[in-house]
């Protein structure tokens, strides 16, 4: 306690936590709290009413099945994406309302309806959530779901570690959500603007929430990268040689190599910031031997590879969808693989373009400028390969294809504006303007479009029925229209001189374009409505939308040879791969419906309560550190170590399904899909200790 | 995939475990890092000397951990991990090297006071 000077009170039992940080007098936060509380009560009530607690714990929370873990990752990501979208809606509405000196103020705000301190927290949480707790978990979830199926594996290389990764990510997301109601979130941007994140300039707990949420979540992501790399390298089925691997698996490999090498840098950058805030060190202070520019440097050494961590799987998704709906093999498979790894390699030498204006010499800026432009070459290769795949193909514009083509279009807009920003003189001119914001949103929306395409594309593989096409296309139409209106206007506003992160805008001439942005946000809201309606209609009409193994009839990669929905053991017999595009090869040879003659026992990992327990304790550790409740943080940490040790005593961690059981499930066609009850293996700890 | 259960104690990595090596690794890396802390706090070396000394000590601590704690070598068991570590070296050189170059050109433009401090050989 005495190492740093803290504002406000501190007690040994509750640290900095007092009743005053929970009680609010702000209508927005009160409204959010009521919404969250009512939604939570309804969800808990429904689970209790239908007596689904046992099912949830047995089949999902304790599960080590890569598909269920993937679905849970995606659910966390979608919930957080919805929260991040609400943040975006609030940002744009504030900017539209707070334009010009005569704009009225509401709810304690001088202009608009959000006071600056609250507005700053909202844009900080928007960025943090969208990048780290929405898009990243959804992509990790998709890789979890699809990569083992594409390489013919039963599960990930380390199923237990996989679940630990998920629950650590959930703990990080939980901390961000907790900050909404208990205390504040950071007001220093998602990138942690230094020295604003130092204790004297941010004396509250907001930066601590931001720091520990990312730190805990990124430990989960890093462990996940190890798992996916090991799975791809070591778990491929017979015949799945390197150059028969589907392109999505290649992009998963490259993206996880990036993640494994980049995320530790973020961990170190945040740990040093933690030393400054908790121990009184001076790593990033302006004086006393510190260097505040070091944080920016370290952050972006992680931050730019993180961009490719996001975009490479998106490229993989596009590369899977376009051939399926063009009814042609992917053009230039080898060059696609080479381009993927070229982008991954270059990603490590471009980070400085995020701070060209910091003041480094012209040689340095020139080097990073050229390196950044080099990314355009392999990316261009990819775009041409997609175009040549489409050329003279039998094109079908089902919902996944619409999203994929939309993503390619956005990639051109985002990529070409990125080339502009890679030129230092232009960068100096438009740095920190909303032009930059529009550029990187186009790139992140490439990922978002791909994600929505991937969800529509692989949903039938996981759940056994297609999503409703009619509503799916409406989601695409409204989302695309929203994207066009918001970001076309934002590019123009950037050229007109509007800088980013403004809670009040002095120039009334910007008003028309700000209104256009708000109309775009309205279309995003309509897209949200159709998304929920699509889910509702799809589940309601699932019987008539049932599909076989190859849900689209023209699937090419190996996941389409597995049953839909995929059984919990994935493949009844270990598949043997014969060609690139195995599903297309088997279809061509008339082997699509061939069943194995003999079955062998299958070992699946037993369920375990340890990962969710570790996640809950990690949340306790993070919460204790944020509020400086040392006993809570210490006990949580010791308990995590204890759970890991206890788990190591559960030696019987595999559950064997006999060959006869497999034969029975396969021949009767019994539903052993992801939502089926009573198929999960027993809980390992229950057998070991009870 | 048939069921399998092997004794974890027979795992090749477990067979490489050695209390003596773990103890030596822990002590060596702690000592190297403690020396780095002491010479940084003591401010006994000029700026460049301090930089060289803590870099060398960091390298020694790293070696102690690689050899004694992680037991990395070129055996079949450890080859993948050793190769993975070796593949990180170019990234390490790239990130540290480019960062060094960036700061070298940045200081004369933005941190003249810091340059003066470097020249005087004192951190304060």
Image (cartoon, coloured by chain):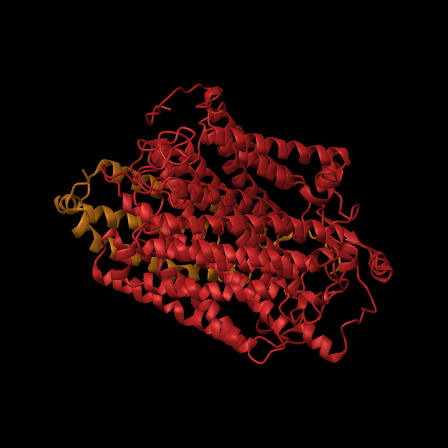
Q: Would you say A608 lies left or right of A248 here?
A: right
**Residue A353 appears in the figure:** yes
Residue A6 drawn above or below residue B45: above
Q: Pinpoint residue B86: horizontal percent, then vertical percent.
A: 43, 61
Measuring 31% from the left and 35% from the top, which residue is drawn there? A281
Which quarter of the figure is the C terminus of chain A placed in?
Answer: top right
Q: Would you say A379 lies left or right of A589 here?
A: left
Q: Would you say A297 lies left or right of A77 here?
A: left
Name the colour assigned to chain A in the rendering. Answer: red
Which quarter of the figure is the N terminus of chain A placed in?
Answer: top left
Q: Pinpoint residue B73: horizontal percent, then vertical percent.
A: 48, 59
Q: Pinpoint residue A343: horizontal percent, then vertical percent.
A: 43, 66
Q: Pinpoint residue A273: horizontal percent, then vertical percent.
A: 36, 39
Q: In terms of depth relative to the viewer, which is nearer, A211 or A682?
A: A211
Q: In terms of depth relative to the viewer, which is nearer, A92 or A515?
A: A515
**Residue A310 appears in the figure:** no
Residue B102 found in image quarter: bottom left
Give the total number of marks visible in the rendering. Answer: 0
Chain in orange, by letter, is B
Q: In terms of depth relative to the viewer, which is nearer, A46 or A360?
A: A46
Q: In terms of depth relative to the viewer, which is nearer, A26 or A8?
A: A26
């Amino acid at each position: 306690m005495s190492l740093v000077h803290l504002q406000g009170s501190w007690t040994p039992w509750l640290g900095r936590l007092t009743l005053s940080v929970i009680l609010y007098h702000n209508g927005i936060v009160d409204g959010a709290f009521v919404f969250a509380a009512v939604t939570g009560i309804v969800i808990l009530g429904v689970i209790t009413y239908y007596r689904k607690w046992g099912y949830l714990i047995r089949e999902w929370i304790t599960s080590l099945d890569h598909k269920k873990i993937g679905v849970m990752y995606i659910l966390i990501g979608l919930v957080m994406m919805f929260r991040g979208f609400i943040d975006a809606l609030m940002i744009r509405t504030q900017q539209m309302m707070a334009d010009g000196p005569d704009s009225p103020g509401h709810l304690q705000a001088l202009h608009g309806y959000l006071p600056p301190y609250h507005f700053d927290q909202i844009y900080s949480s928007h960025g943090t959530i969208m990048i780290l707790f929405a898009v990243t978990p959804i992509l990790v979830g998709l890789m979890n779901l699809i990569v083992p199926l594409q390489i013919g594996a039963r599960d990930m290389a380390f199923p237990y570690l996989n679940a630990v990764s998920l629950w650590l990510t959930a703990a990080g997301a939980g901390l961000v959500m907790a900050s909404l109601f208990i205390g504040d979130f950071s007001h220093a941007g998602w990138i942690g603007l230094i020295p604003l994140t130092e204790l004297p300039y941010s004396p509250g707990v907001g930066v601590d929430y931001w720091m520990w949420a990312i730190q805990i979540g990124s430990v989960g992501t890093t462990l996940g990268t190890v798992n996916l790399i090991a799975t791809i390298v070591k778990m491929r089925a017979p015949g799945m040689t390197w150059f028969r691997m589907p392109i999505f698996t290649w992009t998963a490999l490259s993206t996880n190599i990036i993640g494994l090498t980049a995320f530790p840098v973020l961990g170190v950058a945040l740990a040093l910031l933690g030393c400054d805030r908790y121990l009184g060190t001076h790593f990033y202070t302006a004086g006393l031997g510190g260097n505040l520019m070091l944080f920016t440097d370290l952050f972006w050494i992680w931050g730019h590879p993180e961009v490719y961590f996001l975009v490479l799987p998106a490229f993989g998704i596009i590369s899977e969808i376009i051939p399926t709906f063009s009814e042609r093999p992917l053009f230039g498979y080898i060059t696609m693989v080479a381009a993927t790894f070229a982008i991954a390699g270059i990603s490590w030498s471009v980070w400085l373009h995020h701070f060209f204006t910091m003041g480094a010499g012209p040689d340095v800026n020139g080097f990073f400028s050229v390196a950044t432009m080099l990314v355009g070459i392999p990316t261009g290769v990819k775009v041409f390969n997609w175009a040549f795949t489409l050329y003279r193909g039998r094109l079908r514009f089902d919902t996944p294809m619409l999203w994929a083509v939309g993503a390619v279009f956005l990639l051109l807009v985002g990529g070409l504006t990125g080339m502009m920003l890679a030129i230092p003189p232009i960068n100096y001119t438009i740095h920190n303007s909303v032009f930059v914001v529009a550029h990187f949103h186009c790139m992140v929306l490439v990922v978002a479009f791909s994600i929505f395409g991937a969800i529509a594309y692989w949903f039938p593989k996981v759940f056994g029925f297609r999503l409703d096409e009619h509503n799916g296309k409406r989601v695409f139409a409204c989302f695309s229209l929203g994207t066009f209106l918001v970001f076309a206007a934002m590019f123009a506003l950037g050229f007109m001189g509007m800088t980013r992160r403004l809670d009040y805008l002095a120039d009334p001439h910007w008003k028309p374009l700000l209104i256009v942005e708000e109309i775009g946000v309205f279309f995003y809201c309509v897209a949200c409505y159709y998304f929920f309606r699509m889910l509702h209609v799809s589940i309601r009409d699932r019987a008539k939308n049932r599909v076989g193994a190859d849900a689209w009839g023209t699937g090419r990669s190996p996941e389409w040879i597995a049953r839909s929905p995929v059984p919990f053991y994935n493949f009844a017999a270990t598949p043997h791969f014969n060609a690139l595009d195995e599903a297309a090869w088997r279809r061509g040879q008339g082997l699509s419906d061939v069943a194995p003659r003999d079955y062998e026992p299958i070992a699946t990992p037993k369920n375990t309560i340890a990962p969710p327990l570790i996640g809950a304790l990690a949340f306790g550790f993070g919460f204790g550190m944020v509020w400086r409740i040392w006993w809570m943080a210490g006990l949580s940490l010791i308990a995590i170590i204890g759970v890991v040790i206890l788990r190591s005593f559960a030696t019987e961690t595999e559950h064997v399904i006999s060959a006869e059981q497999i034969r029975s499930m396969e021949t009767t066609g019994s539903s052993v899909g992801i939502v089926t009850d009573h198929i999960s293996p027993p809980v390992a700890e229950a057998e070991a200790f009870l | 995939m048939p069921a399998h259960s092997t004794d974890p104690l027979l795992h090749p990595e477990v067979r490489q475990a050695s209390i003596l090596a773990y103890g030596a690794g822990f002590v060596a890396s702690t000592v190297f890092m403690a020396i780095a802390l002491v010479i940084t706090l003591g401010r006994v070396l000029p700026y460049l000397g301090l930089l060289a000394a803590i870099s060398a000590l960091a390298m020694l601590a790293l070696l102690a951990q690689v050899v004694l704690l992680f037991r990395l070598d070129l055996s079949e068991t450890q080859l993948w991990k050793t190769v993975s570590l070796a593949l990180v070296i170019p990234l390490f050189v790239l990130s540290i090297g480019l960062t060094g170059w960036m700061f070298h050109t940045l200081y004369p433009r933005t941190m003249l006071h810091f340059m003066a401090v470097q020249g005087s050989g004192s951190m304060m």
